[in-house]
Image (cartoon, helix red, strand yellow):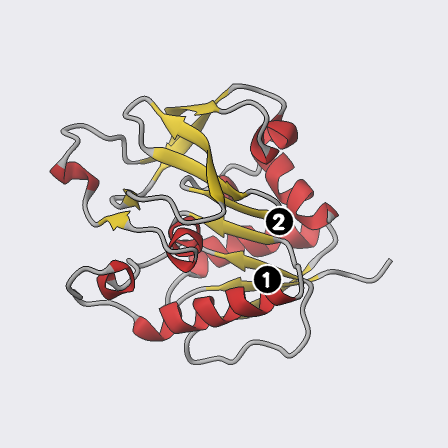
Amino acid sequence: MAQRRVVVTGSAGKNRISWFFIGSILRLLGAKPLFVHEKKSPPSHFDALLLAGGEDICPSSYGAKDEQCNKGRDELELSLLDTAIAKNMPVLGICRGMQMINIYFGGTLYPHIHDFIESHPNSPFLVNPITIKPHTLLHTILQTHYIKANALHHQAIKDLGKELRINAYDKNSIIQGIEHTHRLILGLQWHPEYLPYHPLHLRIFKAFLSK
């Protein structure tokens, strides 16, 4: 079986830590990571798309006033989503990546969740209890209704995009996971790449590469 070529997005000069963990997991599972950013063009051929975490998406993408942001990365990821969807590739979005999937399908974001929630965890460790909805792709992958995850975000999904459904949420009702209704497009608000020692979180990458 040919080695799967996975495009992994990021920002120029950043994302080194997440790329290290993502790359290590993909190689461990037999795939070849292809790292791209707004100053490095993606390859002409790839088999799957992983939208990694990172800096905030430009607010103008969801109808708000722009702050300092990286429009080049936004445009790159939207273009890659066009390609992946046209070719029916699997897509995995992590943190910002999940938010970008939502934007692509017409959704919106809360720019700052602390504007409406007083206390939200912020830690790379398993501090955030998450409920997994039944009859979803994520539940099929994890085979559980409940997990703990890390929390490293200050933005969140507000309005859900078309053709998407929620598959996970936390105790504050913040959306922690989304998926497409009929494509292998999965988004997670947490960072499973930082939890490779945890079998449940590793299952997500195995499922992503199995299609």
Compared across the picture, whether 159 is left or right of 143 comes to left
Depth check: 60 or 170 in front? Answer: 60
Disc 1 and disc 2 in contact, CB within 8 angstroms:
yes
Quick one: which residue is furthest to the right in this view?
A: 1
Classify the position of the N terminus by image quarter.
bottom right
Compared across the picture, whether 201 is left or right of 173 comes to right
User: Which corner quadrant of the image does residue 113 belong to?
Assistant: top left
Q: Secondary structure at mark 2?
A: loop
Q: CA distance from mark 1 to mark 2?
A: 8 Å
Depth check: 1 or 18 in front? Answer: 1
Q: Secondary structure at mark 1?
A: helix
Q: N-terminal of the two: label 1 or label 2?
A: 1
Give neighbour class at mark 1: few <14, some 14-19, many 20+ (Cα, 10 Å).
some
Identify the disc placed on residue 183. 2
User: Which corner quadrant of the image does residue 158 belong to?
Assistant: top left
Identify the disc placed on residue 85. 1
